[in-house]
Image (cartoon, rainbow, N blue to C red):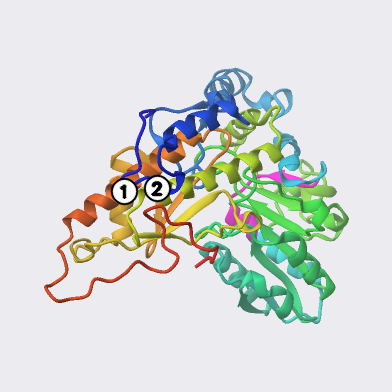
Amino acid sequence: MSESRETPQGPGPLGAGARTLADRAAELDAAGPLTTTRDRFVLDDTVYLDGNSLGALPRSVPDRIAEVIHHEWGELRIRSWTEAGWWTAPERIGDKIAPLLGAAPGQVVVGDSTSVNVFKAVTGGIRMAGKGTTEILVDATTFPTDGYVARSAARMAGLAVRPVEPARIADEVTERTALALVNHVDYRTGELNDMASITAALHTAGALAVWDLCHSAGALPVELDACGVDLAVGCTYKYLNGGPGSPAYLYLRESLQERFESPLPGWNSHADPFGMAPRFAPADGILRGRVGTPDILSMLALEAALEAWEGVSIQEVRAKSLALTDFFLECVAAYAPPGQVRSVTPHEHRRRGSQVSLACTPGPAAADEQHGTPVAGAVMAELIRRGVVGDFRHPDVLRFGFTPLYTTFADAERAAWVLGEVLRERTAAEPGPEPGSEAAGPEQGAIGSGGAPSGGDAG
C-alpha cells in the first residue's frame, strides 16, 4: 500500500514535478502526532474507515476478557461483584469516559443502550422542566431512533414534538419548550453543531439541553461542563472502541442530579438496592442513572478498551482528525473523475466532525438501480471488495470515518486512490452520449481532476 502513484489526470493540485500524495502521506505519518497509538489495535492491511460505526479491537481487550471469564466468572463467581469490582463498574467506567466528554467525575454512568439512555434523558428532562411546557424540540437531522424515542416520551407526557434544524433552534425555542434533543455531529454529513451557542439559547428560554454524542465523543473535544449541558448520551462502540453492542452512557449535570427522576427506576438505582423495599427510593448522585444488572462482559471489555486512551490528548486527536480529513479531500480532488462525487461534509473546521461524506452519483446508474441497488451502494460494495471499508447511507452518501488513534494518512490516500479507480472504471463502462447530444458538465461543488472540495454546504 506504500507504492507511489501519479495523479491519473495530469499533474493535479500539487503542480508539475511535485512529490506524489503517497509520498506526502508517508511523511505526514512519520511526523505525527499519534504515531504509535495504531499499535494499540488489532488491524491488518485493510483500509478501515468505518470506525464511526464500529471501532477496531484494542489489543488490551482479549486478555482482559479471558481473565474475566476464567478467573472472575469461572473461579470467583458471585464473589466478583465485590472482590473484582463488578458492582461499581458503571460509575467507575463512567469516570474514565468523563474526561473525553469535558465532564468532572461523578456525572457519567455507563449501562444500557443508547436508545434506553435517550429515553431516560428525554423523559427525565421533561419531568424536570415542570408544568407549563407544551413541546420538545428534536434535531430535524437526527439519527432516526432518537426521533422515535423522543416522540414516544413526549406522547406519554402529553407534549408535542417539533423537528427543528440545529442552526434554527435559537430562533425556534420558546418559553413553552421543555427541552431540545440535538446531535453533536450529524451522522450522515459529519457536520458539527455548535454546542455552546445552542445550549445557551435553550437556557435563555428556560429549556433544557440534551445532547447525543455518538459521533463526537472520542473524535473531538466535547465540553459538557463548560457549555452547561444538562443531559447527554452516547454510545461506546464507535470512537471509544468498546466493541459491538458495548454499553452506552448517560451524563447528568451534577446540579440536576437530585431533581432527576428516572422513568426506569430499577433496583440498581435504589438507595438501598439489597433492601428489596416495595417502594422506590432513588440513590444519590449519578447512581440514579442506573437501572438493572449491568452487562458485565461488555462493560469490562469497554473498560479494557479505554486503556488505548492512556497518555492521549484529545486536542491532538482533533488536530489529527482535521488533518486527515483535509488530506483525504485533497486526495479525492486529485484522483476522482470530475463531477462524480461532492463533499456534503462542511469544509470549515469548526463545522466538521471526524468523517467525510461524499454524495456519489456516477454512471452508469441504470444497471444498478434496475436491480434495486443505489449507485453509491454499488460503489461502496466495490470499495469494500478492494479492501477499503467505509459505509453507505441512502440515497447517495458514501461515508468515511477517520479514527485518529489508528487511521493513517496512508489509509486516507489509499482510500481516495481506490475510490478514483472505481469511479474511473465505471465511467469507462458508461455508454457515450448520443450523436448530436450535449454532454452534461460537472455538478457545481463537485470534486475531481484537481478541483477543490465543495464550499462546505452540508446536504
Front-lying residue, 424 or 187: 424
At 54% from the left and 47% from the top, the residue drawn is 326
The magenta region covers 107-118
Mark 1–mark 2 Cα distance, whole angstroms, equals 7 Å
Disc number at residue 12? 2
In this view of the protein, can residue 6 be seen by the observer? yes
Q: Secondary structure at mark 2?
A: helix
In the rendered picture of this protein, how many numbered marks are placed on residues?
2
Whether residue 49 appears in magenta in the rendering, the answer is no
Task: Tell me whether the residue at label 1 lies in contact with that at label 2, contact meaning CB atoms closer than 8 angstroms.
Answer: yes
In-front residue for pair 128/459: 459
Q: Where residue 273 sits: x, y (%)?
A: 77, 43
Where is residue 123? Give x, y as percent.
70, 66
Q: Is 168 rendered above or below residue 410?
A: below
Left or right: residue 446 versus residue 184 is left
Query: As drawn, which residue projects farthest toward the front?
Result: 16
The label number, if any, that marks residue 300 in the structure image: none
Label 1 belongs to which residue?
9
Provide residue 453's location: percent of width, then percent of height.
Answer: 48, 57
Residue 48 appears in view: no
The image quarter in which residue 30 lies: top right
Q: Amino acid at mark 1?
A: Gln
Write the residue at 60% across / 34% down.
Answer: 302
Q: In the image, is residue 41 above or below residue 242?
A: above
Categorize mark 2 by other alpha carbons within 10 Å: few (<14), some (14-19), many (20+).
many
What residue is at 72 percent from the left and 79 percent from the top? 171
Q: Quadrant of residue 210?
A: bottom right
Question: At label 2, which amino acid type do we have?
Answer: Gly
Q: Secondary structure at mark 1?
A: loop
Q: How far across and down, in percent of the image, does residue 254 sit?
A: 85, 52
The quarter of the image holding the N terminus is top left
Decide which of 295, 452 is in the foreground and name it: 452
